[in-house]
Image: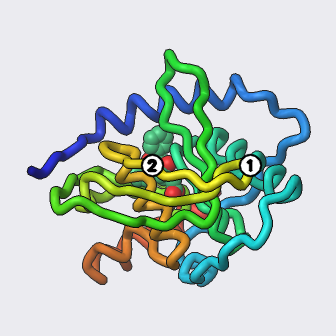
Amino acid sequence: MNITVNHLTIAAYHITYKLKAQRIDQENMAILPIVTVPDPLLKTISTPVAQVDDELRAFMDDMLETMYDAPGIGLAAVQVGRPIRVLVMDLSLEDEDPAPRYFINPEITWTSEDTAVYNEGCLSVPEQYADIERPAECKVRFLDYDGEEQHIHADGLFATCIQHEMDHLNGIVFIDYLSSLKRNMVVRKVKKLVKEA
Ligand code: K1U
Ligand code: ZN
């Protein structure tokens, strides 16, 4: 079975996250610059984290703050210039409390044969979207904020987002799934956007 999610879902999340960014306590947190395509850093294979300590937790809090501010629903450490295997995510809706998730050294241990199509965006490819097909469900093993091993079974947008973020850890951006013609067009548009900003 294949599922397609359209732009309305994205639009609803955009509104939600603008509001959520205003609710976060900004004390002691930093908004980090986001790397955009075609920066070669985005092609880097990120290295595993050796130790979950306060310095890493402070960095993950900064990542989360950066993600809420953008706004986005996920972010990989390499997108803010640090190629280590760390992701943050928050898929909560407007009428829900923030639900930050932290993934350290995540590994996908299973993917479903069923696929889903989502009109994906990426903070490293601003204002560009494309339908991407991925496994509809996946299982992930990772370390949490406290360094404890966790296992989750993801479906829906959660599965899409975690696979998109895991791709970043392996040097892959969603536009790499497009034809080279489309990809080059998108990169040209992003370069122009960044130049004009
Ligand atoms: O840059 C990133 O990796 C984050 C990315 C996560 C993502 C979005 C859609 C499908 C898969 C993965 C974003 O958040 S891009 C921004 C965006 O599209 C969005 C922003 C706010 C709410 C919903 C989507
Ligand atoms: Zn991305």
Who's the residue at 64% across and 60% down the image? 104
Ligand 1 within 8 Å, label 1 CB: no
| Residue 90 point in image, percent of width and height | 55, 39
Who's the residue at 50% across and 27% down the image? 16
Residue at which label 2 appears: 152
Mark 2 and mark 1 lie on one chain; the one further toward the N terminus is 1
Q: How many other residues sit within 10 Å of disc 2, few (<14), some (14-19) or many (≥20)?
A: few
Q: Secondary structure at mark 1?
A: loop
Residue at which label 1 appears: 146
Q: Which image quadrant: the C terminus?
A: bottom right
Q: Is residue 144 above or below residue 106?
A: above
Q: How many other residues sit within 10 Å of disc 1, few (<14), some (14-19) or many (≥20)?
A: few
Query: Looking at this view, is 16 or 116 the one in front?
Result: 116
Q: Residue farthest to the top?
A: 95
| Location of residue 185 by image quarter | bottom left
Q: Is residue 30 above or below residue 188?
A: above
Q: Amino acid at mark 1?
A: Asp
